[in-house]
Image (cartoon, rainbow, N blue to C red):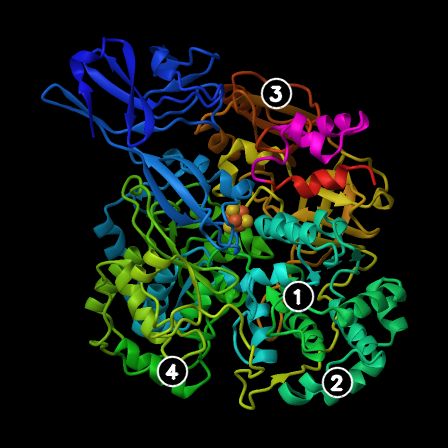
Amino acid sequence: MRVCDLDQILTNAGVCALVDGEQVAIFRVDDKVYAVGNRDPFSKANVLSRGIVGEVKGELVVASPIYKQHFSLTTGRCLEDATVRIPVYAVRVEEGVVHVQPAKHVKTTCCFCGVGCGVIATSSNNAITAVKGDPAHPANFGRLCTKGAALHLSTDPAARLLYPEVNGERASWDQALEFTASRFREIIAAHGPDAVAFYISGQLLTEDYYVFNKLAKGLIGTNNVDTNSRLCMSSAVAGYKMSLGADAPPCAYEDIDAADLILIAGSNTAFAHPVLFQRLESARARNPDLKVIVIDPRATVTARAADLHLAIAPGTDIALFNAMLGVLQREKLLDQVFIGEHTENLPSLQPLLDYWTLERAAEVCGLPASQIVLAARMFGAATAALSLYCQGLNQSTSGTHKNAALINLHLATGQIGKPGTGPFSLTGQPNAMGGREVGGMANLLSGHRDLSSAADRAEVAALWGVPSVPALPGKTAVEMFEAIGRGEIKAVWIACTNPAQSMPDVSAVRKALERAELVVVQEAFRDAETCAYADVLLPAASWGEKEGTVTNSERRVSRVRAAVTPPGEARADWEIAADFARRLSADLVIPAKAGIHFSYASPEEIFNEHRETTRGRDLDITGLSYALLERDGPQQWPYPAGATAGRTRLYADGIFPTPSGRARFVATEYTPPAEAPDADYPIRLTTGRLRDQWHSMTRTGLVARLFSHSPEPEVLLHKDSFQGFEDGSLVRVSSRRGSIVLKARASDDMRPGDAFVAMHWGSRFMAGAGTNALTVRAFDPHSKQPELKHAAVRIEPFAAKWRGILTAAATSELPREASGLLARFDHAALSLVDGAESQVRFELASSMDPDPKLLAALEDLFGSPPAPFISASDRAVCVCFRVSESAVRSSLANGANLATLQRDLRCGTNCGSCVPELRRLLPT
Ligand code: SF4
């Protein structure tokens, strides 16, 4: 857009112009012209065009005329606060006229959790400068949580893989993919197609997933394609199929508004699905009759907000649900009409119901019998009962039956298919559902087809133009890495996931990766732990750079759109997989598959092919298209051809996709977790999410403000579990598989005898292999989902002979270089400290004096020697406005309430993620 003549701008001065409705500050420095946003983000005034320009620390900046901050004219970065950026606009001068390219606003979808919030990303000059919630998206209506609101802060190109590499050397795409294709050909020729495997991700888009699945099952002829969704939702899938006949969550988010009882099982929703929890809180504010029951071993923020919290012993949910069903039966709270007309198999549960007396269940679950009765009565008396559940049920060796036992309660009371009712699994990842839709797992096929069905296999083979797809189920996540460790799988291709951090018993997974003949890692972020094991590194495009679709927890398909182009030579995931497939198919030694093609020109072509595989299936989306999603916004499936809207809620007619059309009661046997506490390992360890981090922190670990809520790895314990050590002291936590040293923290959230460590910590941020050094590989027999939620551990004091702490201003390189030294200490924690100038904080301890050369290396890196240890600064409750817990407590001591906290400190007035915690801190 033309803005002015060059002569109208004085050299080394600025002018302000309105570009597409936005104020832009334009500066002429020597013979160059720069354009940035005119708004000073600190004073909120449109004044930067009046600022002085010059060089600071080698960077051309404009100084705010109001406060002291400086902003780079080339990147928009604030020199004093790395978390703040102003927009930078592309500018050109033609024939003496200055043209500024307006900012772009692109509607897309958050790449973190399964809520699937709509995001509007603002970009200029090929950089995403801001995000806000999309008010029109039905998943969030404009809300974003702390993670979503920080999306634009995690786009630093310095954190990215920019070029392909082969054996540690930079390579062209041709070289990298030809090398990989030739190694795959050799291995397949020598050992057969099952000697290769793909381990992919619930964070891929549906189109990416589709191509990988077709490549493995259609072209290569192996079902060895599994995904990190195996660690997340596979028990929910198996539970739905076992009870209801199909992998289809029956509910919608709007059911939260219509329920009068919400039972939350095994989910800290306030942290894991914050925007959904805010919706629940709003529903409660509107309807005081809406009651909430939370079943969780920990008194989480979610549990503390409940009307009834059942602090169940870890892993005993089936005993509880069976006992609740017994109460419902004895107190005649069953819906006999619904049971008679729409279900089968209830009589076969009678022995279970007789066995699970209140007394027995109370003892196993560690609950008062009266609480079980109360929970059952609340459920049975509800007009509309909705269950929300997540990893507390899924990540278990009896996860499928835990899901089915909860679904039994819904079937017994007819609480399904009506507004405000139903069993509703909350999807962990943004597109675990999309992956299931395309059959991107070792035991599934496209369009919710089953690998075990010859008819289903034949349909998929016909759709792909191949003679057949293999019948033998592939290796699921845990099995796959075990097979790699045994040398049966020789080549593995890992895309968009970080198994060297996230898999259970991670030290064994790392050994397996070392043994593999070929490890291909397709990844956006260069510091993901798995990159260290790669023979071939392929740089992938990331959030904000990709086009496609995702499906959220409520079956809603949303468009993901690119706001900028990927950095360096990074490419879209589907494009890399399709390019490889074309090269591989040119000379593949397995039977010719001339009919199969990978010549996609766009993700839309892939979507259209995927859409065809759903025709006539339960998830039929033949009525959807990119054009319709563009016009009408995100839509729920099924959405068959000819429909004018997707289906909000399933099973309203009481007909289920089972052979009889009836839902099945499942006789769910309680089995204890795989690893019981004993004299050597007496503590039960559970794992879970932090509010402000995501998975293995490849993205959120780049943002200083996302550390301020939980800055470092800790093990939370009940005060009675402190034996021989104190609150805040270092302890060694050991399981039969490994150990880590971290701080012990007393928490009244915990039951005596239980411990909790957040799942996110890996060897990029702490010494050792991270949280998953401790967890078990044992998995559920139906879903093959591992029991990440339960391990037996021992906790002992750690005697540090030496402790030190280093801090320095954060640069892109410092965390990476410091991370490389973590393993040299018994205890080390690396974090970013949010503030006027973000800092890197490196805390270290060892049982002996460190090598002087190591200390010298640290001094070189940080510019000063390690200082004596002091404890980390006060934890932030509100990261948007940097409000610490001590500030909140101090205000409360002076008589503040929620409204005055929000007025005076501003906490809880932006994204709202901290409101549940603020409520928890209020005096009762
Ligand atoms: Fe993203 Fe937060 Fe929404 Fe989840 S709740 S999709 S993390 S903004």
Dot 2 crowding, Cα within 10 Å, few <14, some 14–19, many 20+: some
Q: Residue 820, percent across and down?
A: 50, 35
Query: Mark 3 or mark 1, which is nearer to you?
Result: 1
Question: Relative to residue 252, is residue 58 drawn left or right?
Answer: left
Give the residue type that dot 2 points to. Leu
Q: How many marks?
A: 4
Residues at circles 2 and 1 in contact by the CB criterion of under 8 Å: no
Query: Which residue position holds label 2?
Result: 349
Mark 4 element type = helix
Nearer to us in this view, 626 or 607: 626
Query: Which residue position holds label 4?
Result: 457
Q: CA distance from mark 4 to mark 3?
A: 62 Å
Dot 3 crowding, Cα within 10 Å, few <14, some 14–19, many 20+: some
Q: CA distance from mark 4 to mark 1?
A: 36 Å
Query: Which residue position holds label 3?
Result: 866
Question: Relative to residue 814, is residue 287 drawn left or right?
Answer: right
Question: Which numbered disc, 4 or 1, marks the residue that appears first in the sequence?
Answer: 1
Question: Relative to residue 764, is residue 169 drawn left or right?
Answer: left
Residues at circles 2 and 4 in contact by the CB criterion of under 8 Å: no
Q: Residue at x 27, y 79 (%)?
A: 466
Q: Does the numbered disc 3 mark a residue whose Cβ is under 8 Å from ligand 1? A: no
Nearer to us in this view, 255 or 790: 255
Query: Mark 2 or mark 4, which is nearer to you?
Result: 2
Q: Quadrant of residue 207?
A: bottom left
Q: Quadrant of residue 460?
A: bottom left
Query: Mark 4 or mark 1, which is nearer to you?
Result: 1
Q: CA distance from mark 3 to mark 1?
A: 53 Å
Residue 414 on the magenta span: no
In the displayed structure, 590 sits above or below 842; it is below
Q: CA distance from mark 2 to mark 4?
A: 34 Å
Q: Residue at x 35, y 67 (%)?
A: 624
Question: Which numbered disc, 2 or 4, marks the residue that appears first in the sequence?
Answer: 2
